[in-house]
Image (tube, grey):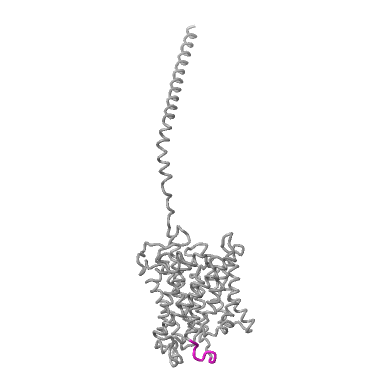
Amino acid sequence: MKKIILSLVLGLGLLAAGSAVMAQTDAAATAASAAVTAAAPAAEAAAAPAAEAAASAPAEAPKVTVDKGDVAWMMTATLLVIFMAVPGLALFYGGLVRSKNMLSVLMQVLVVFSLICVLWAVYGYSLAFGGEGKVFADLGKIFLKGVTIESLADTFTSTVKLPEYVFIAFQATFAGITCALIVGSFAERIKFSAVLLFSVLWFTFCYVPIAHMVWGSGGYLLGKGALDFAGGTVVHINAAVAGLVGAYMVGKRIGYGKEAMAPHSLTLTMVGASMLWVGWFGFNAGSNLEATSGAALAFINTLVATAAAVLAWSLGEMMTKGKGSMLGAASGAVAGLVAITPACGSVGPMGAIIIGLLAGFACLWGVSGLKKMLGADDSLDVFGVHGVGGILGAILTGVFTAPSLGGTGKADFSIASQVMIQAEAVLVTIVVSGVVAFIAFKIVDIVIGLRVSEEDEREGLDITSHGETAYSR
């Protein structure tokens, strides 16, 4: 009996203790709930200003990067363009003239290129890329004012930049080789001093504004939507028109059309053409400004378009003359390089091959049929190759950029509209270059004269202009 009573007492005690614990837990929970309920409005009130502050704070600017790979590629591309000019273009031209004028052409290419690189740093870069404007930029960066090792230049990606010095150097080589191209039109009879003075005038009042209009911020042709990836208008058409004007104004070589004026070394011409092809990869793929798939596209297009043009020119010669010549194959390579230049970053490889094939045939006609029609003594066929090839390439850029033809254009790309824009860019370049070249040649003729004497021309410019010869006699 005692055990039963003790068990009941123990059970009632445990029950009472459990009830007390549960009561305390419920009370605590109720208190906690009340505290949370009371704290919620306070938390919301505290969070509201923070949320408003976060909403009103400006978004964090994208991080700008300078990629070492891009910098290395662009310095390499710049070296390749220098290689195009000296020695590439110099040897290509030098082999095409008579041996008595070999050094004069080498000297003109070397010194003109050097002169323009200096002028580019002094004021050319500032006027072309130093600010906004439809035709010129401004002189805010004259003498490279404000440019330091810390200053950056834009690429085609908003968050990727280049050291500005690299961009300046790369663009300087474009200006230099453009002016050097012109000397081929009046080789073997022009005064050395006349070449230099003309180069200064034409560079200042033609190359710089055309470069800005096509590539510079706010440029007129850029605003119109003209496509020129690496210089079809800026370099090739521009130089070719100036050269043609020069060929007319300097006059024909003594004995032209009556005496043999065959190239003195096609071996050197082949070497020069090969150097041009190698260097052109820097010219075209470097214009992408980044070591990306865009550069790869320009690279392969430069390869296949040039190869196609070599085949087309050689085939054209075999069909018309019965034989394909080494000079023709080398000229075909240059024709293909010229024609693909404006299109290399926006067309597909198959489009590039078609452009190359058409350029080979068209430029063959340019140095034969068209040259006779024009009646000018364009000594080294600058207009026939760079003019015809440049115009063809610029127009066809408007065709093969279409995505339906393998290009990189947007889905709503209109071939007809783009071709009209390309035609306007070509026309503007021809008019500006022709007018400026005519005035510049006139000024040079009045100030120092354009042409050497008949006696000096017959003896050769190597001796009469530079006091040396290319080969020992």
Q: Residue furthest bottom?
A: 455
The residue positioned 41% from the left and 83% from the top of the image is 444
Q: Residue furthest top?
A: 1
Residue 324 sits inside the magenta stretch: no
Residue 301 location in percent, x, y?
55, 68
Residue 217 location in percent, x, y?
45, 64
127 relative to 246, above or below: above
Taking depth in this image into account, of 406 and 327 the one nearest to the observer is 406
Give the position of the C terminus as an image quadrant.
Answer: bottom left
For the record, the magenta segment spans: 251-259
Q: Quadrant of residue 132?
A: bottom left
The residue positioned 43% from the left and 30% from the top of the image is 36
Taking depth in this image into account, of 1 and 174 the one nearest to the observer is 174
419 relative to 64, above or below: below
Q: Quadrant of residue 399?
A: bottom right
Q: How many marks?
A: 0
Residue 253 sits inside the magenta stretch: yes
Residue 422 location in percent, x, y?
54, 69
Q: Quadrant of residue 114?
A: bottom left
Taking depth in this image into account, of 89 and 429 the one nearest to the observer is 429
Q: Please name the predominant secondary structure of the magenta segment in the image.
A: loop
The residue positioned 39% from the left and 77% from the top of the image is 115
Residue 303 location in percent, x, y?
55, 70
